[in-house]
Amino acid sequence: MASKAAIRRLTKEAQLMEKDPPPLVYARPKEDNILEWHYILRGPPDTPYAGGEYHGQLIFPPEFPFKPPGIKMSTPSGRFKPDTKICTSMSDYHPHTWQPGWNTSTILIGLLSFMCSDEMTTGSVTASDADRRTLAAKSHEHNLANRRFCQIFPEYAVRDGPKDLPNMGEWKKTQQAATASAAAEAVQVLACLPSNLSRVSRKRRRSVRDRYDRIQRVTSNRRRRRSSTTTSGSGSTSTSTSTGTGAKARNPGRPRVMSGDGGSAAGGSGAA
């Protein structure tokens, strides 16, 4: 039996859900049991669940909001085992992570986000994206065969469904506005790109050209210095060689003049 706190809290949440449900999410309690809620999730676009209609249950404990609910999904999705409890941080698998401030909308938005992820947990299954798209296309037909779905959501148990949830129109407007805003921003960015890229390109070309010119100048200077040094050395060697050769040619028989004793001996020999 539900506690007074649970009844008060869940009654308030039911009113809030009817007044302002989140996009892609809708839920309501059973008329004879406020602790048993049934929900509908719509598959987000650009996911394998797009167009899908997923029905499930939230089983709240009598101690709610101080303890978390159990979560199940009845509609085959290729993500969770039908009618099996799902382990998430907001379910009764993890009471230690539960926050009393979390409400029905928070739980279902979290479940939808978790559904679109690839994280495996207790109650999850693996399937290809193609299989999930096939199940999404058959989801409404499956829900029509579910007696509880038809009893809880008679306005959605229509043959030409699935029918949009209460806030689906608002979600579509939000998505369209976001798309238009993103497109306008992209146009502005693209309009600025050519001039920016041109300036950057000119700067880079100028920088590369300057570096190339500096390298060329340094290389040229080094070559000139090397060439000058080589030419100067060759000229000195040639001059010295030719001078020595000329001296020998002019005095072929002249003895070398020695200093010291050598010089005296040479002089004595000449006197004799």
Image (cartoon, rainbow, N blue to C red):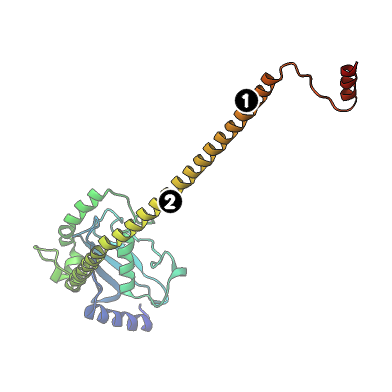
* Residue drawn at point x = 20 percent, y = 56 percent: 136
The vertical placement of 27 against 228, above or below, is below
Query: What's the amino acid at mark 2?
Result: Arg
The disc placed on residue 242 is 1
Query: What's the amino acid at mark 1?
Result: Ser
Dot 1 and dot 2 residues touching (CB under 8 Å): no
Task: Say whether residue 88 is left or right of residue 231.
Answer: left
Front one among 187 and 46: 187
Point out the tag, 1 or 2, that comes first from the N-terminus. 2
Which residue ends up furthest to the left in the rendered image? 160
- Label 2: which secondary element: helix
* Residue drawn at point x = 24 percent, y = 75 percent: 21
* Residue drawn at point x = 21 percent, y = 59 percent: 50
Which residue ends up furthest to the front in the rendered image? 271
The x, y position of residue 210, in whole percent, is 41, 53
Location of the N terminus by quadrant is bottom left
Task: Give the residue number, with chain letter if any, for mark 2.
Answer: 211
Front one among 119 and 216: 216
- Label 1: which secondary element: helix
Instruction: Answer few, some or many: residues within 10 Å of disc 2's Cα (few below 14, many 20 plus, some between 14 and 19).
Output: few
Please identify, in this view, whether the residue under mark 1 or under mark 2 is nearer the observer: 1
The x, y position of residue 16, in whole percent, is 26, 81
Q: Quadrant of residue 141?
A: bottom left
The x, y position of residue 268, in whole percent, is 90, 19
